[in-house]
Amino acid sequence: MRILIVEDEATLRNGLRDLMIGDGHQVETVSDGAAAVELGLREAFDLVLLDLMLPKLGGMEVCRRLRAARPGMSILMLSARGAEDDKVAGLSEGADDYVSKPFAARELLARVRAMGRRHLGLSVDEIIRVGSLTLDLAQLSGQLGERSFKLTAREAGIVRLLHHKMPNPVSRSELLEAVWGSRGDLETRAVDMAIATLRKKIEDEPAVPRLLVTIKGVGYRWCQ
Ligand code: CA
């Protein structure tokens, strides 16, 4: 992707630039909000990594202006504040995702890659490899270390959706609707049961899941 990095702190800006170049992206950097709008309107970018607290023009305003002019461009907001209010405000201004500082490089890369997949309109890879686990969603099969197993179509559907939404969590009702084709909170227990069965197949320690993680009060998230 072609990425615009907007960050006033030089150390972080350079760190982000190196991280994105290392991941195979083309990168431009600017250090204030006015320059971000100027360059973002003049040239096309696939993704903007946008700091919230910026000199000259704040990140929210930058987001609003770029979003209005370039609806197809992804915007990922970065903020030191970590406040829930900022997140909600950022997303309502048209940001596609939000990362709180300090963030782990790995987490940021995962989010950028997820945006890249959305940007390209690619469907999820039908073969997923994480450590010693391989899942073939098309063939409904998997292997964990030496052990092979079968997946049900429903389990493949769960993995496909969670993987696609990564790094964001997916609610039980969203899973229920997408994978089971039904609505209704009463049935969400079916989701929990299916997840428990799936964990026994794909997790090294099903009782301490590391891939298919529960986000309390929200739902489930795929972590890789
Ligand atoms: Ca800043």
Image: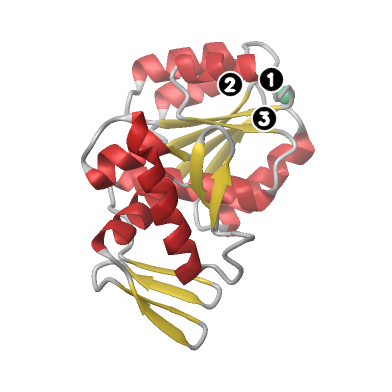
Mark 2 touches mark 1? (CB < 8 Å): yes
Mark 1 or mark 3, whichever is nearer to me:
1
Mark 3 CB lies closer than 8 A to ligand 1: yes
Q: What residue type is labelled 3?
A: Glu
- State the residue in front, 223 or 37: 223
Tag 2's secondary structure? Answer: helix
Percent of width and height locating residue 113? 47, 50
Tag 3's secondary structure? Answer: loop
Q: Is residue 23 left or right of residue 137?
A: right
- Residue at image coords 32%, 69%: 151
Mark 1, residue position: 83
Number of numbered callouts drawn: 3
Percent of width and height locating residue 118? 35, 43
Q: Distance between the residues labelled 2 and 3?
A: 17 Å
Q: In which quarter of the image is ligand 1?
A: top right
Residue 84 found in image quarter: top right
